[in-house]
Amino acid sequence: MDRSTIVDLGLPGRVLMELAGAGTVEAIAARLGDVPGQAVVLCGGGNNGGDGYVVARHLVDRGWEVVCLATRAGSELSGDARANHDLWVALGGAVRVTGPEAPASLRHAIDHADVIVDALFGTGLGRAIEGPAAELIAMANAASRALRVAVDVPSGVDATTGRAVGPAFEAAVTATFGLAKPGLYTAPGAGLAGEVVVVGIAFPRRVVDAVGASYRKATARAIASLLPARPAEGHKGTFGHVGVVGGFGGKSGAGQLAGRAALRVGAGLATWVTPGDAPQRAPELMHHDLRDGLPDRPDVFVIGPGLGDDEAATAGLASALDDGRPLVLDADALNLIATQRDLQRAAGHVITPHPREASRLLDTTVEGVEEDRLAAVAALVQATGAVVVLKGARTVVAAPGEAPVIFDLPTPALAAGGTGDVLAGAIGGLVAQGLAPFDAARCGVWLHAHAGRLAGLGQADRGVLATEVADALPRVIADLVNGWS
């Protein structure tokens, strides 16, 4: 987008840099008000450093006392970065260039700053930070009183994966330019970025649309547009029927939670499918004996919660995969698929692995999945052909031919047994109401996360039961509808 805007359309890069720096200062002012203080801007040798000199100039114009601590002398800079360095100096701005070892006097300046701006490295960094830049980052991270602000991406964070190789700047606010970067919403980058503010830098809409999105971030407006219609003349048959295959043996709660969630998102009917008689169950759930085969009436099956790994579980999964109706595959179903080749037929269905289940499907480690979640979800789509919901603090939903969607909705309220069963049931309930699997997965993840947040209100995000998450789903849907009607 930079190249197309600057080279093809002729909008000078200097203009984009000016807008970036000015927007960063607006983000600072929005948090600290118009009362000026002391600022330190850490400037690197590339265009990120050039952004830093623009930030410094705009802060001075607002009355701030500013010093730039640079890792490169002005004579080593080029292009727009050099031009903005020279303008800063021409206006009387102070630049102190660090040597092989940053002197103690720099620590004094950093320790007494009200704002520290990180403009050392931008989006293209592919190595661990060393030398003076690493020392400046360490000093900045140790400063307790300053608001730490990153320019575009916190130095040391991979803009795509969120990985941090070596030292990384720990920002409270990241002003990122043009469009958000996926690495700001995946761990550990999300924790290092703090609050993310997207600063417009005049990319024309035509350029944005032509390049297209590599990833998308879920928003309330986008999710609201996916909610299934609810005609006033509808009845229980109108809104679909979910079959839940699971809750076998001593895990009956898992199957019931999935069925409860399916009904709570608006499905008209839910049938719990088990081998033999069901134990006592919620009155809203019907029951079907799996020994008679799969029931005919459900529009979609959620299979896996509390399924187990015995002969009955394997047979039930095989029957569902052979059936042809849409499936939401979760929990034990994924473990069976990972270990039995003849069950590896998830294409077109929805799978909802957490990192350990994903590691089994990919024959890797949990650490390998978490190191690059975006690569992991892409590998899962490639391997299975399914709509993949890679669960976690920031869930990612991906599907063949679609830009993966990142959900920046972390909540520890969902760190409780059974909440994954609720998610699987919610997605199944949305498929039953007519949503395509990819749409149902995106909508279900959003509703589930906000239901967890709602259930956790007043409880410090702890002690939340999975049933409470399921029961909060109608309120979340109502808020979404009322907010965007």
Image (cartoon, grey):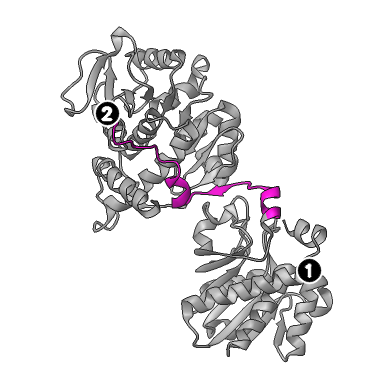
- Mark 2 element type: loop
Is 78 left, or right, of 277 in this rendering? right
**Where residue 301 sits in the image (x, y, percent)?**
37, 23
Farthest top residue in view: 292
Which residue occupies the foreground of this view, 81 or 203? 203
The quadrant where residue 38 appears: bottom right
Specify start and end residues of the magenta stretch as a single range: 206-235
Dot 1 surroundings within 10 Å: few (below 14), some, or many (20 or more)? few
Q: Is residue 254 visible?
A: yes
Mark 2 is on which residue type? His
Kindly give the residue lying farthest to the front in the view shown: 233
Name the residue at 37% across, 30% down: 433
Residue 48 shown in magenta: no
Residue 200: horizontal and vertical position, in percent? 62, 65
Please tell me whether residue 208 belongs to the stretch shown in magenta. yes
Seen at 55% across and 38% down, the residue is: 377
User: Which residue is found at the position 28% from the left and 29% from the top?
Assistant: 268
Judging by the rendered image, the residue that carries numbered circle 2 is 235
Between residues 70 and 465, which one lies in front from this camera angle?
465
